[in-house]
Image (cartoon, rainbow, N blue to C red):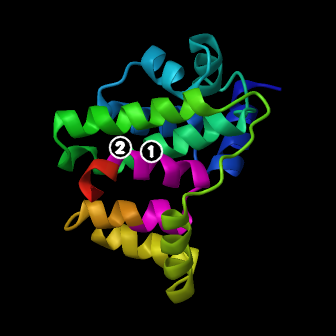
């Protein structure tokens, strides 16, 4: 299978080529491709193959989840101070260190489950995503909460909660 076919498959799987997704996630955060690979838990060579269309998909679900968390972070990065960005990156990095090869998920924090249940009780995932998009320019923090807790994975919720826990104490 050729690179063009692989990129078309990536578009079908992820909505756009992985090269575009990875660049959009890494660029606002000032991450090199090698640093992005380390954060995702992939080898630099594997990430290179993915972004260049030599491979179709990220086979590791944890790495895909970390990419999703990185994309979410990049959306709000302009509104964060450099220390806040570093804290959030560290939370994503800590999340990757907590995962095992068996990909067992930690149970969601009771607080994150309550927030998710509340958001899903009042709106669908599609509605929450539209609301987050609408709020992104005027209230990026609120938009991030809607995306992460409304439509994100358990890992996304855990990483986000870890990155803001100091604000709750």
Residue 1 lies in the magenta-colored region: no
**Mark drawn on residue 71:** 1
| Residue 76 drawn above or below residue 53 | below
Circle 1: element type? helix
Residue at (42%, 37%) from the top-left corner?
91
Residue 96 place in picture, x, y as percent: 56, 31
155 sits to left or right of 54: left
Name the residue rendered at 60%, 43% in the picture: 65
Residue 115's label in the rendered image is: none
Mark 1 vs 2: CB contact within 8 A: yes
Residue that label 2 marks: 74
- Could you tell whether 48 is left or right of 28 in the image? right
Looking at the figure, which quarter contains the N terminus? top right
* Residue visible at 66% across and 26% down in the picture: 53
Part of the protein shown in magenta: 146-164
| Number of marks drawn | 2
Q: In which quarter of the image is residue 81?
A: top left
Measured Cα–Cα span from mark 1 to mark 2: 5 Å
The image quadrant that residue 108 belongs to is bottom right
Number of other residues with Cα within 10 Å of mark 1, as a class: few under 14, some 14 to 19, many 20 or more: many
């Amino acid at each position: 299978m050729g690179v063009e076919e692989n990129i078309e498959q990536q578009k079908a799987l992820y909505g756009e080529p992985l090269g575009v997704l990875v660049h959009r996630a890494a660029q606002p955060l000032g991450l090199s491709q090698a640093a992005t690979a380390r954060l995702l838990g992939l080898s630099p060579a594997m990430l290179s193959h993915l972004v260049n269309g030599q491979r179709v998909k990220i086979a590791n679900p944890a790495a895909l989840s970390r990419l999703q968390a990185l994309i979410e972070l990049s959306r709000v990065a302009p509104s964060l101070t450099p220390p806040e960005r570093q804290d959030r990156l560290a939370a994503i990095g800590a999340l990757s260190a907590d995962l095992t090869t068996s990909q067992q998920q930690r149970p969601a924090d009771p607080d994150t489950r309550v927030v998710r249940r509340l958001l899903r009780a009042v709106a669908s995932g599609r509605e929450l995503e539209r609301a987050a998009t609408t709020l992104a320019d005027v209230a990026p923090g609120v938009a991030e909460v809607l995306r992460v807790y409304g439509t994100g994975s358990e890992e996304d919720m855990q990483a986000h909660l870890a990155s803001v826990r100091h604000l709750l104490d």
